[in-house]
Amino acid sequence: MRDYCAIRAIIITVFNPKYQITQKILSDLTKISEIKAFVEKSRVLPSREAFLRKTALIKMAHTSTSIEGNTLEEYQVEKIAKGEKVTAGKGEVLEVKNYLEALKLVDNLLESKKSFGTKEILNIHKTVTLGLIDRNKVGVFRKSPVYVVNILANGVEQIVYTPPKFSMVEQLVDELVIWMNSKDEIYPIIKAGIFHYQFVSIHPFTDGNGRSARLLTLLSLYQSGFTFKKSLVLEDFYNDDRKKYYESLQTGKNFEERKNADLTSWLEYFTQGFLFETQRLKDQILSFSNLLKRDVVLNKDELKIVDFAVNLGKVTSDDVADMLDIPKRTAQDKLKKLVNSGVLKKIGLGPNTYYKFT
């Protein structure tokens, strides 16, 4: 027993990430804190707040699986969330279903625990990968070597990162969990960013590492009080430029190099993305608040159209037809109604027509 305790004491001191809080990071964290306060104080109709949360769940499931190569569109993910059938490969559909279930698990863990450990990590991985990989690898740390590869234009696989030996995985995860639960003085966003980096560097599973990392990062933020009314979608920032996401994580070609790397650059990227998405959420809330002030009542489909226009800066009839899975003529009618009510402004003519939130 004494030996075991000694080992645990050694483990606690092993993981010691290197980074600096630059002026850029500090500036971004200050702005995020201001937006956090704004979101917490904001008052929109309960139906619209529920819409924001539901939209965020769909976006999380869509973007996080898209990063891993899933080709389903967002409207198809929404259909899956409703229990409707979509025409797509069984594997891609199951991947989305699993992710939606894992998001529910994150909510349950938030309600029941103030921290998470190895058990919760394995449960999240099990939920994410069930039915997608060999059953003996589901919710279990890997028992073999793995490599992160890029597929070159000629089809050749290029190894870009070699994770640690599988015999080290359990101890490394244990170290990370102990660090997470003993470093409360670290600002929650910085802690979450470091966790995300270290988890994907350890690469504890044969598959599902990215999805598990993003879910656990979300759980860490939620447990630290950074819920943003569960309407923030960090995955969107990563998905918009996947190459930049992977490049920011790539601080070494193997675990030994990453272990000693300076994480400042990654944390600048992480906080920049966090700020970008919080600003986008603030814009959404402001848009709904403006609608309330003008006494405009929108139905579910109209809220989706407005949300799309706010997020992307504009919306077209083709966007609406795809998003709502309706004929283009019907989409044009819905847009015309929003223009007539003063919610959207029509810009351009013919095929170049698009609409902006007023």
Image (cartoon, helix red, strand yellow):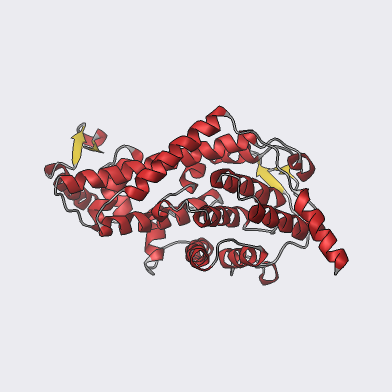
Q: Residue 268 at what x, y percent from top left?
A: 57, 34
- Which quadrant, please, contains the C terminus? top left
Above or below, comparing residue 91 to residue 259 in the picture? below
Residue 240 shows in this picture: no
For this orientation, the residue located farthest to the right is: 3
Q: Nearer the viewer, residue 215 or 179?
A: 179
- Which quadrant, please, contains the N terminus? bottom right
For this orientation, the residue located farthest to the left is: 340
For this orientation, the residue located farthest to the top is: 23
Above or below, comparing residue 351 to residue 300 in the picture? above
Q: Residue 89 at what x, y percent from top left?
A: 50, 62
Identify the residue at image location x=36%, y=67%: 82
Residue 326 image-quadrant placement? bottom left
Q: Residue 142 at what x, y percent from top left?
A: 73, 61
Q: Nearer the viewer, residue 59 or 90?
A: 59
Identify the residue at image location x=42%, y=49%: 232
Residue 66 shows in this picture: yes
Q: Residue 73 at what x, y percent from top left?
A: 42, 53
Q: Is residue 88 left or right of residue 152?
A: left
Q: Nearer the viewer, residue 317 or 250?
A: 250
